[in-house]
Image (tube, rainbow, N blue to C red):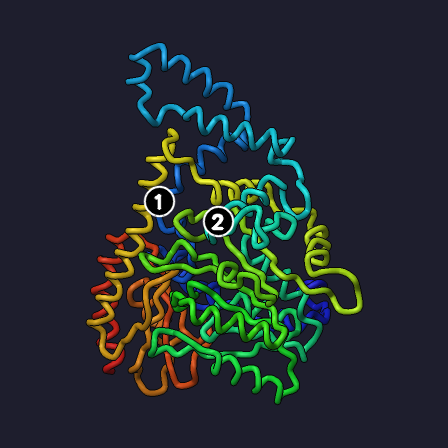
Amino acid sequence: MSVSEKLQIPVNQNILEMEYAVRGPIPIRAAELRKQGKQTIPCNIGNPQALGQDPITYYRQVLSLLEDPSRIDRERRLNRLMSQDSEAQVAMGESGSISGYVLDLAEMMISTHGANVGAYSESNGQLFVREAVAKFINKRDGFDPAGPLSADPERIFITDGASEGARHILQLLITGPSDGIMVPIPQYPLYSATIRACDGTQVNYYPNEDAGWVFDRAILEESLESAKQDGITVKAIVVINPGNPTGAILDRKTIDDVIDFAEEHGIVIIADEVYQENVYGAEFISFAKALGDRDAPLVSFHSVSKGFYGECGHRGGYMELRNPPTAAGTDLSFRDVIFKQASVALCSNLVGQMMVYLMVSPPEAGSEPYDQYVQERDTILQELEDKATLLREGFAQMDSVECFGRTGAMYLFPRLNKLPAGTNDFDYCMALLEETGLTTVNGAGFGQREGTHHLRIAFLPPKEMIAEVLPKWIEFHNEYVNR
């Protein structure tokens, strides 16, 4: 053993004890199996392009020009040549050139940034990107751009994915173990892990699974009262809509209940809305729209990682603040303090910022890239819905498996009502991996009511792959639970 290995240095115990199941023991075992040459199907994480989803052509064309601006003039010359030579048009085909619309857009973005994408921006993100986000929010929620509800670019932060925004607000709110953050159970482990790392207390509330993961004011009040009895001051409530891992899509009444609850008790609403495109025919209602002119503090997130874009690796997202409160003992609003947090990191990555701009600024109807963009978008969303439907049909053939609520987000969260004595959902998911290669996450990794067992599966692999593995899963399941 080396000298450094013998050295013992005390570290933050909260970091040691935090857990993140989507990259936990089951995915780690899957990686070991792949090293042994065995095939696995990674359905443990919402990472679309790792599972074969093609990027949107429009996005990648613009990003390629931003990374290599010298191509803009070359593409313009190529377009002129093709317009004058019909044989060149045939030889190159549609894939051989980039439209003038895309070239103009890339040129505008570089010019507005004032440098290439290797340069820093303002700490809260490029102004033109934040202005585009504000325009997107106003259009989505029907706000008059000149009215009192209009999104304010100065209260929008461009972040390295939505996760960075969540960490910013939780770090700001939590001052110690007596500060509580309400989270839905089950929840995405970003929240439990970050609350733990910040030395705060997680306060659970439990949506009604059998009713489709709905909840009401009474459920929230019960959770709050229990926290108070334990000496916990609840500072915020996390709401994930559509849900992760459940896929639940919240209706207007539920959203209004959350807003009324937060307003009455002086609690910040943390609205994770990164799956707002993944509603498959249902209606998405943003918390900003439902909030209207009410006074509850609201922090909402969106991300380029999900939806139909699936650009996880570009780490782009935004955070919008509404009704930001003042930091106690100061004259600084939460916006000012979050700006200070963002300044420490200088800025979020520029390619991610540009991807956020593209996410909120699709090609205009009638423009050269528009039809291809719409076709690619609709195809991805329809395929996601089809794969979820295929899996749900498979659950019906599994002994004592139920899956509640509408299909939303990118996940299904079936309940395993029957397991062999002495086993739990972790044992089930590990055995499923070893037998079929299917990599899922056990329900305990997200939290669940005591006595219940679940798993989360991302319905992202190609449909053919799901169709191939599903009969093996059904066979495995029915044998395993009846041992």
Q: How many numbered tags mark residues here? A: 2
From mark 1 to mark 2, how far is it between C-alphas?
A: 13 Å
Q: Is residue 354 in view?
A: yes
Question: Which residue shows up at 60% across the image and 29% down it?
Answer: 111
Residues under numbered marks 1 and 2 in contact, where contact means CB atoms less than 8 Å apart = no
State which quarter of the image contains the N terminus.
bottom right
Q: Nearer the viewer, residue 24 or 302?
A: 302
Q: Residue at x 32, y 73 (%)?
A: 404
The disc at residue 1 is none
| Horizontal relation, residue 166 to residue 421: left or right | right
Q: Amino acid at mark 1?
A: Arg
**Outermost residue toward the top?**
84
Q: Which residue is mark 2?
A: 304
Residue 343 at x, y percent in the picture: 71, 50
Please give left or right for residue 332 compared with residue 463 in the image.
right
User: Mark 1 sits on what residue?
Assistant: 377
Q: Position of residue 417 (x, y in %)?
A: 30, 81
- Residue at 49% across, 32% down: 64
Position of 10 with respect to 251 (left or right) is right
Q: Who is closer to the viewer here, 163 or 424? A: 163
